[in-house]
Image (cartoon, helix red, strand yellow):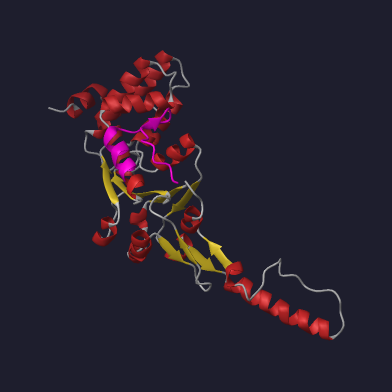
Amino acid sequence: MADKTYWTGSDKYHCDKDLAQVFHISRTLGMPLLIEGEPGTGKTELPIQYARDLGLELFVYPVGSKSNVEQFVASFDHVKYLRDSQVEILNAQREEKGLASKLTTGGRQTENMSDYVVKGPAVNAFLSPNSVLLIDEIDKAPREFPNDLLYALSHRKFILPESGEEISVSEENMPAIVITSNREQELPTAFKGRCIYHYIHFPEADVMRDIIQKHFPQIENKIVDVALDVFYHLRNIGLERAPTTRELLNWLKYIKTYSTEEAIQKIENIEGVGTLIKTQGDLEKIQRHVLRDPDDFKRRSTPN
């Protein structure tokens, strides 16, 4: 039976009460959890850290613009099947000529279609009790991809190609499925209806402080105070792409290699700005309004 414990995070992952609740509901009902939100808010890390914390097997499908249901579920290796068919013909001819040696198919038999089915992460997760399945950034997929998953999500079963074998799982044994989306495109309503939904809002400073503490337990509070002040100022000045949690952690990973005094000075000068800023326009804006006059930057970006 799949794990149904109420998971509230780990020493490496901050899971607030709302997220913990919907994650628990999705696993209790045997339904996927669809998480939307700004990039870098911990959507992808949830199933990864959950699996790591509980020692569960994790299957990951990173979605791209050419993703299709065959890659995700299973595909039939027609090339290998054709090659093995030719090997069988050649072996029959060799036997007629009295030759004892045979060519090998690696134990595969052409009459057994399942020997040529290449299982994807979805089928492997269904076949692995108490596992975790991550479908990452589904909003990058072609429109038909989420629609093709409707039957499987509703009936908890897949039909393997050519062999016709049915892979199914009960509601109680359904793997923990987490689907993430950055909302690059709207997902079909019918697809959303098969999921438990949650939107992760960007963390407030007190939550962000806890996240930093989990990643860097030895970091000085003074460094964190100054870094958060600068970070949220950057998020408030109307950048094209505001820095995210992931980028803040990368910045601090660099900054904390220095002494406290040096680290604070580098933070105030936004040294290593390339870890935070990801577009040319934003970088030019920072250089114009921040690096030239840090005091004016703080006055402009402080919320009223």
Q: Which residues are magenta?
A: 1-25
- Left or right of 291, for residue 11: right
Residue in front for this viewpoint, 69 or 26:
26
Position of residue 199 relative to residue 146, above or below, is above
Q: Residue at x 18, y 24 (%)?
A: 299
Can residue 128 be seen from the camera position used here? Answer: yes
Viewport quadrant of the C terminus = top left
User: Is residue 235 part of the magenta span, yes or no?
Assistant: no
In the displayed image of the protein, which residue is found farthest to the top? 261
- Left or right of 97, for residue 91: left
Q: Could you say which quadrant of the image residue 275 lies in?
A: top left
Position of residue 218 relative to residue 246, above or below, is above
Residue 283, position in %: x, y?
Answer: 32, 38
Residue 189, position in %: x, y?
Answer: 24, 60
Residue 163, position in %: x, y?
Answer: 53, 72
Q: Residue at x 26, y 44 (%)?
A: 199
Can residue 181 be seen from the camera position used here? Answer: no
Residue in front for this viewpoint, 139 or 247:
139
Residue 213, position in %: x, y?
Answer: 39, 23
Position of residue 177 relative to residue 81, above or below, is above
